[in-house]
Amino acid sequence: MALALCVLSLCSLFIGVADLSLSSILDDPQVLVVSRLPRTLAALLTGASVAVAGVILQLLVCNRFVEPATTGTSEAAILGLLAVTIWAPAWPILGKMAVAASAALIGTFGFLALTRKLPPEQPLLIPLVGLIYGGILGAAATFVAFQADLIQYLGVWMSGEFSGVVAGRYELLWLAGGAALLAYLAADQFTVAGLGRSASLSLGLRYHQVLALGIVTVALVSALVIVTVGVLPFIGLVVPNVVSRVMGDNLRESLPFVAGLGAGLVLLSDMIGRVVRYPYEVPAGTVFGIIGAAVFLQMLLGRRSYA
Amino acid sequence: MMKMSELSYSVSGTDILRDISVEIPARGMTALIGPNGAGKSTLLHLMSRQMEPMSGQVVIDGQDLATITAQARALKLAVVAQHLNIASRIRIRDLVGFGRWPHARNRPTAEDRAWVTDAMTHFDLIALQDRFLDEVSGGQRQRAFIAMAYAQDTEWLLLDEPLNNLDLHHARSLMARLRDMADHQGKSIVIVLHDLNYAISWADHVVALRAGRVAFEGPVQAMATGENLSNLYQTPVAMDHVDGRPFARYHR
């Protein structure tokens, strides 16, 4: 897996509108250092952290069919971004990010509060409620953006793509990667939380602390990714499900694979997006949306069930 | 000994449990019985602090459960819930292994691993240990969760209707195993049971709840009378004795 990621990353460095060959790097490393390398790193960091956020959310909600982009987290972050764009447009990016992350946090807690009221025997209700909840928040965002003449911004935030990534404009993603790495330290805690509230309390897990840690990670990653590259749907849903199908949900074993697969798939989507309409680009989010939807449908329909 | 005093619990103004004061003796098996909606599961949850009572307290060996840490509680008492629909794909071996979590956290020792193997052997799970939880039947999953609680090696073991998904063979061998743990390992077991005959033929002590109050409680041999049980379930129950144990006839 690590090898595949390295090969992908190397290829990514040499794909793009500006020609780049080994000899030209030596003459003028500008394109590599300013554009290609940051773009490759951004895709890897985004994919890894979004996939990790997805699996954490799934374990905390005890539901396989949720991800931050379908539970109102992304929409809440966008509402926060809108608010700060309207009222404090001069704030530095870090301040905007903090507002977006706080809004995402509130939005995610709102979703959790909703799911607590749902009957556990109906697992599909949770993603449905998430979609409706996200839809309402999204509609509010559209309304506000329309009133404030910011619809264009909304478009940028809603479709994740990496063409705008250059050195100096993606470094926040390292924070997202750091948050995902930090989550790995609590891998066992999240796995236990995934066994449900009752079992985790019986095992002496400080359930509410773990819940809070997880939600903060999810909100932070979502906000950071939206601020820098935009929403990338399906990554947080598909990647954890694929890994879970193969190796289960013991995060201590599976989290590195979740991160790796997420990183690889996002990078691959971005590379496909770069070449499919060369010299124009298709957003990575769109490419992955198509792949992800197909994979997810396949997983839903191909579920094996036992007694 | 577990001493509950004046426990009350209500949900949006409706009383589920009112002024429950019961003492449950240590080292033995206590059955919680009563009709649907009597508050049995709620009481079990309050005992284990999975839910917090509106008022009252639970004291084990002189220690108020509300004042000790989650980990200290997990070393004293393990709970097996009734609804085990979890989305997580965990191997049976890993699930049972998490029973050692309160003891070892992230660093299981050889002793912890021995406990896990022991638990899987007792609950007939060795052949299933590499399977994921969603690849086994409801009864097998139930056994896996009970094995996890067994591996937790606590003095108190609380089970909410553990026989629900079990076939005759596994239901009976589970009760025998619990009986053995009470008799020979000094465990204190509290078990919510729907099947009246399982309750009165295996337990030492019975706590009967009706409409959120204690209807009667005490040693099974003294309390399991036709009159008590008929009143409890509002259904005629006649008592027999089979092999020296009480046996209830209510099927028709």
Image: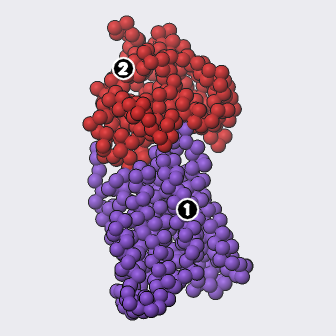
Task: Please say if A179 is above or below B74.
Answer: below
Residue drawn at x 67%, y 25% as measured from the top left? B6
Q: Chain of mark 2?
A: B
Q: Which chain is red?
A: B
Task: Please say if B250 is above or below A287.
Answer: above
Residue drawn at x 47%, y 14% as measured from the top left? B204
Left-right relation of A117 to B182 = right
Residue drawn at x 60%, y 49% as measured from the top left? A209
| Circle 1: element type | helix
| Circle 2: element type | helix
Q: Colour of chain A?
A: purple
Percent x, y of residue A37 = 47, 80
Frontmost residue, B206 versus A26 = A26
Left-right relation of B4 to B247 = right
Q: Check disc 2 and report the residue beneath it.
A: B176
Q: Are marks 1 and 2 on the same chain?
A: no
The tag on residue A179 is 1
Is residue B252 visible to us here? Answer: yes
Percent x, y of residue A158 = 52, 77
Q: Chain of mark 1?
A: A
